[in-house]
Image (spheres, rainbow, N blue to C red):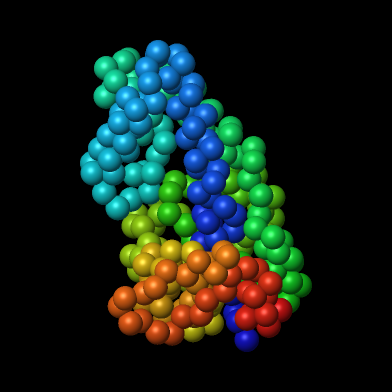
Amino acid sequence: MTGAVIFDLDDTLYDYKSLDREADKRVQDFVCNKLGIDETRYQDAYRHGRRETKEQLGNVGASHNRMLYFQKTLEYLDRRPLSLCLQMYEIYWGTFLGKMKLYPGAREVLNRLHDKGIPVGICTDLTAHIQHRKLEALGLTDDIDCLVTSEEAGQEKPAQEIFAMCLHKLRRKPEEVCFVGDDYRRDIKGAMAAGMRAVWFCPGGEETVCRDGAKGYEVVKDYGQLGKLLHI
């Protein structure tokens, strides 16, 4: 019997990519209107700011910080970096958090896990503050038995430190735990390396072909299939 289930958050419990696109567009429109610049110039500055942040910080949670992306975007545009940065940040996350919804069937799976007394963890890259806000927006604050972010662990998936911290908090052995995530390299390979059962979540059956020949993971396209796989 499964002793605990750990979920990745972004693009596993909800659709991150579509919200990210919409929120980015809202910020872009705001900045272009305020500064009188075209979309191409803004996009070039934003890509520069994002790339520079990641190059400077490396594989840590803070490398995803939107405030840093926006600050460096304004610096690249030769504007005072604090002039619009906070507004950009609030527009992005206000748009994003206001429209978050769990994937269909996710709530039912979580309820059945609780009914069976199976602990639920979240193992996610990014900073703790924004992941807490996402979980609150999704109505999950009372559903999660442990949360580990890459900010807390000091390493991003697939580094083993982040998986080990989850196991420690849940007080479970690797072979007792099922990990569910959408990213093959970070989630699936990382969880398998940690000794966990790994389930690759691919909405719509959009499974990427893996070229490394790895075996030992399972694939589901929705939460109905996940519930059956977990026998709940």
**In which quadrant of the rendered view does residue 188 lie?**
bottom left
The C terminus is located in which quarter?
bottom right
Instruction: Identify which residue, 44 or 232, lies in the foreground.
Output: 44
Please report the residue visible at 32 percent of the width from the left and 25 percent of the height from the top: 41
Query: Where residue 114 appears, x then y in whole percent?
Result: 72, 69
Q: Is residue 157 above or below residue 47?
A: below
Instruction: Identify which residue, 138 or 99, lies in the foreground.
Output: 99
| Residue 36 shown left or right of residue 87 in the figure | left
Let me know if residue 125 appears in the view: yes
Let me know if residue 152 appears in the view: no
**Labels in figure, total:** 0
| Residue 61 shown left or right of residue 116 in the figure | left
The N terminus is located in which quarter?
bottom right
Q: Is residue 215 above or below residue 135?
A: below
Please report the residue visible at 52 percent of the width from the left and 35 percent of the height from the top: 23
Please report the residue visible at 65 percent of the width from the left and 68 percent of the height from the top: 223
Query: Where residue 147 appears, x then y in whole percent?
Result: 53, 58
Query: Where residue 70 appears, x then y in whole percent?
Result: 38, 29
Instruction: Identify which residue, 133 or 216, lies in the foreground.
Output: 216
| Residue 72 shown left or right of residue 39 in the figure | left
Query: Where residue 139 appears, x then y in whole percent?
Result: 69, 50
